[in-house]
Image (cartoon, helix red, strand yellow):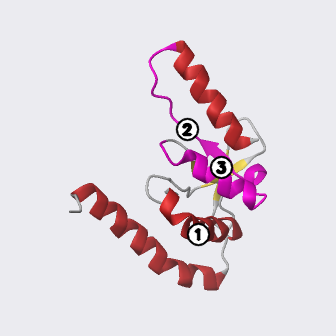
Amino acid sequence: MTNRREFLGYSGATAFAAAMPAFAADKKKIPGRLIPGTNESLPVIGLGNSGSFREADLSNAADLLDIFLQHGGGYVDVGGVSRMSVGSIAKSRNAADKLFFGNYLEPNSGDAIRSEVATVKIICE
């Protein structure tokens, strides 16, 4: 049985997917904002990965990432259990250098944090 969190996640993904054909037809780029103190900018819309990049949906996730990149997308959340999927898809598309990967750290010990950072570094290389 689907719980409320899953329902809201699927509903949001469905609404986004339904809007994508119209957005894709316009070939508009996602607007960006400058990162303070740099000459770089990030798009104002990013991708989270909680439901988008699960192992069973790699083909759809790859299509979603392709569309995202075509419209100037650049920020992808790589926290959680599906971060390796995100990295794998980005690498297969030669897009790892075009994306800004964000992550959060949960471990409580210094060794666990170092291990987490090393894992995320593998995704970004």
Give 54 or 43, whichever is nearer the viewer.
54
Amino acid at pointer 3: Gly
Q: Which residues are magenta?
A: 80-109
Relative vertical location of residue 93 with respect to residue 41 in this rendering, above or below = below
| First reached walking from the N terminus: tag 1 or tag 2 | 1
Amino acid at pointer 1: Ser
Q: Secondary structure at mark 3?
A: helix
Residue 82 got which mark? none
- Residue designated by label 1: 59
| Residue 43 found in image quarter | bottom right
Q: Secondary structure at mark 1?
A: helix
Residue drawn at 74 percent across, 59 percent down: 92
- Residue designated by label 3: 87
Q: Which part of the image, by quadrant, shows the C terminus?
A: top right
Find the distance from the CA under tag 1 to the CA under tag 2. Answer: 23 Å
Q: Which part of the image, by quadrant, shows the N terminus?
A: bottom left
> Is residue 2 left or right of 61 when viewed as pictured?
left
- Residue designated by label 2: 103
Q: Secondary structure at mark 2?
A: loop
Find the distance from the CA under tag 2 to the CA under tag 3. Answer: 12 Å
Residue drawn at 56 percent across, 46 percent down: 83
| First reached walking from the N terminus: tag 2 or tag 3 | 3
> Is residue 20 left or right of 24 when viewed as pictured?
left
In the rendered image, residue 26, in percent from the top left (x then y), is placed at 63, 83
